[in-house]
Amino acid sequence: MCGTNKTLKTLYSNLVLADLILQVTSTFYPGVPVDNMYKVATQKETIAELVGNDLANKYITNRQYLARGHLAAKTDFIYASGQRASFYFINVAPQWQPFNAGNWNSVEQYLRARIGQAGYNTVVYTGTFGVSQLRDENDRPVDVYLYTDANNNPQIPVPLYYYKVVYDAGRRLGTAFVSINNPYYTESEVRALTFCTDHCRNNSAFSWLKWQPDRIDMGYSFCCTVDDFRRTVPHLPAFTVTGLLS
């Protein structure tokens, strides 16, 4: 796992490093009631402070709320110890529920199946980048965080992007699968936030990926070359890629 203590944000997980989760969880959120931050009632109170009560009631509903979005999925692990570790808070970030159950779930399931079917030997980096925004009562975009510490520092950001970068070192092939974590952006906004040429839409090489990338409520999604991805998300570890992994 790689994260930052300042904002209590997990940057990415790497399945090779999964055993570290148990060691760092107890110190990553010192004194922060993380479990309470994910309760719907608490979310509504927190977001009301950012955008006002009326809009908070619009944004946080029985259908749309911030779930615990897992980076490394439970089903990515074979052994019970790894599966249990995936539920620690250092392995999660706030994720809108329809996206969690929609395109994020799809990329987890279909990517796992594709790797097995194709016989790839991959490393998967799963992470977040940026801070999502909601408009306040004055129609101004406001960064969304679930917690503010005693010094008024915002922490536990709601990520703008979720991603999975899949890399086969033997073939030197890799692809970045990216989704936007905000159901309230407009079509023009998500298109402006698409930071690379998409390689999945209308590409038969990715016909195995049965997601709905144009559904903003389910997580507007696109695929990048690893080099293009790095230009926007610089914290990805260094490795050499010569083409797309499909």
Image (cartoon, rainbow, N blue to C red):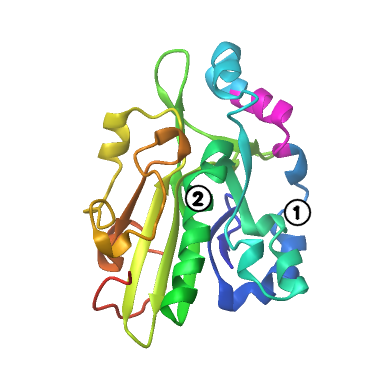
- In the rendered image of this protein, does residue 116 appear above or below residue 225? below
Helix, strand or loop at mark 1: loop
Pointer 2 local density, CA inside 10 Å: few below 14, some 14–19, many at least 20 = many
Instruction: Please provide the residue range marked out in magenta.
Output: 37-47
- In the rendered image of this protein, does residue 103 appear above or below residue 110? above
Task: Tell me, yes or no, if residue 127 can be seen here.
Answer: no
Helix, strand or loop at mark 2: helix
In this rendering, position of residue 43 left or right of residue 235: right
Real-space Cα distance between discs 1 and 2?
29 Å
Which mark is drawn over residue 237?
none
Q: Quadrant of residue 169?
A: bottom left
In this rendering, position of residue 203 left or right of residue 110: left
Front position in the image: 179 or 90: 179
| Residue found at x 26% / y 51% | 201
Percent position of residue 175, x then y: 34, 67
| Residue found at x 54% / y 51% | 105
Pointer 2: what residue? 104
> Is-magenta flag for residue 147?
no
- In the rendered image of this protein, does residue 166 appear above or below residue 192? below
Q: Quadrant of residue 72?
A: bottom right
Percent position of residue 58, x then y: 55, 17
Amino acid type of disc 2?
Trp
| Residue found at x 64% / y 37% | 148
Percent position of residue 164, x then y: 45, 61
Pointer 1: what residue? 30
Amino acid type of disc 1?
Pro
